[in-house]
Amino acid sequence: MTGYQDTFRASLDDPARFWGAAAEAIDWYQKPTQVLDSSNPPFYRWFPDGTLNTCHNALDRHIDAGHGDRAALIYDSPVTGTTRTYSYGELRDEVARFAGVLAELGVTAGDRVVIYMPMVPEAVIAMLACARIGAVHSVVFGGFAAKELAVRIDDAAPKVIVSASCGIEVARVVEYKPLLDRAIELATHKPDHCVILQRPQATAELGARDVDWATALTAATPRDCVPVAATDPLYILYTSGTTGKPKGVVRDNGGHAVALRWSMANIYDIGPGEVFFTASDVGWVVGHSYIVYAPLLTGATTVLYEGKPVGTPDAGQFWRVIAEHGAKAMFTAPTAFRAIKKEDPKGALLADYDLSRFGCLFLAGERLDPETLRWAQDLLRVPVIDHWWQTETGWPIAANLMGLEPLPVKPGSPTVAVPGWDVQVLDPSGSPAPADTDGAIVLKLPLPPGALPTLWNDDERYVASYLSAFDGYYLTGDGGHLDADGYVFVMGRTDDVINVAGHRLSTGTMEEVLAAHPDVAECAVIGVADTMKGQIPRGFVVLKAGVEADEAELAAELIAMVRDQVGAVASFKEVAVVPALPKTRSGKILRKTMRGIADGADEPIPSTIDDPGVLDKLRPILRR
Ligand code: COA
Ligand code: AMP
């Protein structure tokens, strides 16, 4: 069984056999005797009686096999002028000691630890240390503001929070500690302790609950890996839903390890000892899966890059990293390539570097526009692979499987369904849509290992959000179609989730912030097309009767509120005061119609519209 079609069929015809075989690549304390537990649909469990430790599989196992000197993690930080390589042995020792720090602070198996950190090795060390002692980490992206962090603290209820004194952005040092303190103040749940990594760019003042990372590490006793059930949670990762409340995506230990190990070989064509460079952030799923877990589970070398594609200091940094560390493949978001293209349209900076060991570029996180695809192909002269997935799925749903059987690229398509994923397109009645016809992209249950088994403490929301639209299917929230060759075309979200520079955000969260302004009666935030960031949010507010606000002043206040409460990463920079918002007769704001008009589409006016005149007045503002 070598080709794509055979492998894909085998994975759907007999998932237990397929994933049972894949599980051989993982070290188990107790080998699972059952592969898939389907006894309680729609809740499925993979490897229900297996026990393992993810940290053991990511680190100790390679050392035990004699590879302790192999590079595990290369920290490359142009913003601090640092490069440091950790061998598997060194990384394991740091992780074991930090596991000791957590254990000595009272963290035991099943306890949650929130990690709010910039792109430093200590973030990875903290994640793996949790895995080592069976604790559940929840990494919160450093670009989120205090309020967003507070919401996550309340939901995850961590015993300990691990953070740093600061992160480094292009033009400024971002002090994390005041944001953390503010978040804890806002949250109802209080952690017992915060472990703070002091960075020289801005040191933080430590309070009674705080513990200094370096001091604690020196004093700690290293801990060994503890066996956990395959079905025990490894982490919770919050992602934007359509409401203001983020969804706590749960990842289990067993299915995750098996799926990621399989994906590394079959999708990314990366084996032990090879160098993989993912330019994302550990706060996103891409960072969890392909900066941290998949490369290390494989025994490969991962690059942790603290910098941006441009501006730190130039648009040649990706090429420098690839060349200096000998990366065989890199993974980033299309927006990063658009940013490079804007700064260096001819790719002149590439000439300074030797990319002879570089074999493939993987892009995901948002739709790969054909122009960016062509630019990257022409410049790099290696395969450029679009692939599609989500925080919830944990690894790619559709891809061109470079380690299995590379297929011809069709611009605009992330190629075909990955083995394990039964990708279908349904029309609103739930019938399969014909080829080339857009509909809801769904995944037939059971989802393969590695996909979310549920939402943290909220089975009901898991079912309501993903499984209730079409019985027996997981709703991806993306619309699109399959062509006659089975290629998947993902056209965009069908809900109010937006994607700004590869960052998934909820317009609902931004609306909650705007609605809290005393002058605002109602509001809508929509994502509109942007040539660089893919999408950016635009806000529309209706003032309360009798309010006569200075529009520019109000807009500035609202923009500052979103920056303060959601984070700079939302890139919320445009808000207009409008007389009214277009609605259906039942009072639902017609956001999709507004979005279509703003994007210049020939948007049909829904028959359910209450007052077409409202939309007519809004049209010139939307079109700008
Ligand atoms: N901590 C604090 N602030 C952060 C942050 C972090 N971890 N990450 C971003 N921000 C801030 C930025 O400083 C910026 O603030 P500003 O408004 O004061 O300039 C704002 O959030 C927006 O940041 P960003 O989205 O990075 O936009 P940018 O205009 O600075 O850069 C790109 C544009 C395209 C270079 C950048 O978005 C990028 O590298 N995107 C790739 C994203 C990616 O890898 N996504 C992961 C999915 S694979
Ligand atoms: P996230 O959960 O942050 O990974 O965001 C997932 C969403 O990003 C998906 O539901 C899609 O809307 C979008 N997305 C990710 N990858 C792609 C891709 N290759 N093509 C189109 N959209 C994508």
Image (cartoon, rainbow, N blue to C red):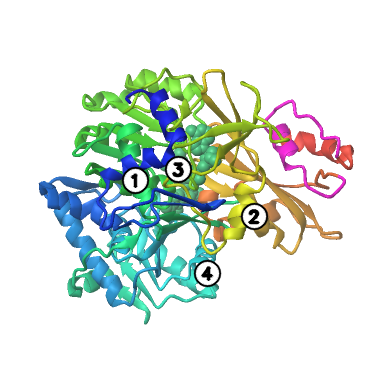
Task: State if disc 1 and disc 4 touch (CB < 8 Å).
Answer: no
Mark 1, residue position: 258
Q: Earlier in the sequence, mark 4 or mark 1?
A: 4
Residue 515 in percent (x, y) is at 71, 59
Mark 2, residue position: 243
Q: Earlier in the sequence, mark 4 or mark 3?
A: 4
Q: Earlier in the sequence, mark 2 or mark 4?
A: 4
Q: Is residue 208 visible?
A: yes
Q: Quadrant of residue 120?
A: bottom left
Q: Amino acid at mark 1?
A: Val
Q: Which residues are magenta?
A: 585-608
Residue 380 in percent (x, y) is at 33, 22
Kindly report the distance in space between the C-alpha atoms of the residues bearing marks 3 and 1: 10 Å
Indicate whether residue 22 is drawn in magenta. Answer: no
Q: Earlier in the sequence, mark 3 or mark 1?
A: 1
Closer to us: 276 or 57 = 57
Mark 3, residue position: 448
Q: Amino acid at mark 3?
A: Pro
Q: Earlier in the sequence, mark 2 or mark 1?
A: 2
Neighbour class for label 3 at 10 Å: few (<14), some, many (≥20)? many
Task: State if disc 3 and disc 4 touch (CB < 8 Å).
Answer: no
Kindly report the distance in space between the C-alpha atoms of the residues bearing marks 4 and 3: 30 Å
Closer to us: 351 or 62 = 62
- Label 1, ligand 2: CB separation under 8 Å: no
Closer to us: 148 or 55 = 55
Mark 4, residue position: 154
Q: Is residue 464 left or right of residue 44?
A: right
Which residue is located at x 41 percent, y 42 percent? 16
Kindly report the distance in space between the C-alpha atoms of the residues bearing marks 2 and 1: 32 Å
Per the image, label 3 sits on a secondary structure element best described as loop
